[in-house]
Image (tube, rainbow, N blue to C red):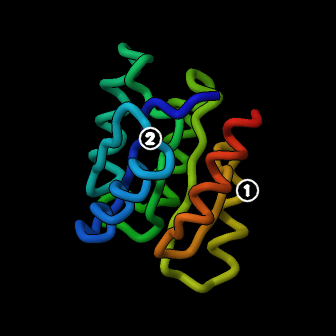
């Protein structure tokens, strides 16, 4: 599977910019879209349903966000989008050190990875290799 489109959902603008640069450098997607919270991201995905070529193959998701949390986003994503876009994978990013956050996140079928912030280049290369081998 190729990675043409990536969605970053991150409420911290500095973290979002750094992650975007890393994604562009390592994954070289056609586009990287950044949204500040889950609510904005859900609106974007709803608009992308009619344009499947724009729908992201990877979604990097912060857990702790205003409006719609990362947990709420996972549930909404699986209810509305996972059947339409079964190859899209969610990568959860968090500054939390709670093991329970990892366990809950990985219970969702769409979640392909759970990483602590900041994401490192080595981890992103691992993600790329796993996707390319699908």
Residue at mark 1: 107
Q: Which residue carries the number 2 mark?
A: 28
Marks 1, 2: nearer the viewer: 2
Residue 7 is left or right of residue 59, and the answer is: left
The front one of 5 and 86 is 5
Per the model, the C-alpha gap separating discs 1 and 2 is 29 Å
Residue 121 position, x and y percent, is 53, 64
First in sequence: mark 1 or mark 2?
A: 2
Q: Please state if 134 lies on the left or on the right of 92 as rendered.
A: right
Residue 99 appears at what percent x and percent y?
A: 69, 80
Q: Is residue 40 left or right of residue 76?
A: left
Label 2's element?
loop
Give the vertical position of 61 relative to 14 (above or below).
Answer: above
Residue under the point 34% across and 57% down: 21
Q: Which of the 4 image quarters holds residue 132?
A: top right
Q: Going by the picture, which residue comes out furthest to the front?
A: 25
Where is residue 75? Give x, y as percent. 55, 48
């Amino acid at each position: 599977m190729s990675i043409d489109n990536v969605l970053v959902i991150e409420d911290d603008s500095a973290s979002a910019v750094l992650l975007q640069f890393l994604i562009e450098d390592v994954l070289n997607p056609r586009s990287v879209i950044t949204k500040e919270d889950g609510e904005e991201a859900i609106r974007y995905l709803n608009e992308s349903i009619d344009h499947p070529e724009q729908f992201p193959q990877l979604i990097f998701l912060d857990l702790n966000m205003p409006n719609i949390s990362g947990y709420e986003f996972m549930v909404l994503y699986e209810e509305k989008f996972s059947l339409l876009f079964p190859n899209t994978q969610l990568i959860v990013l968090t500054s939390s050190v709670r093991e329970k956050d990892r366990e809950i996140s990985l219970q969702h079928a769409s979640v392909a990875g759970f990483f602590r912030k900041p994401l490192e280049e080595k981890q992103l290369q691992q993600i790329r290799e796993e996707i390319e081998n699908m």
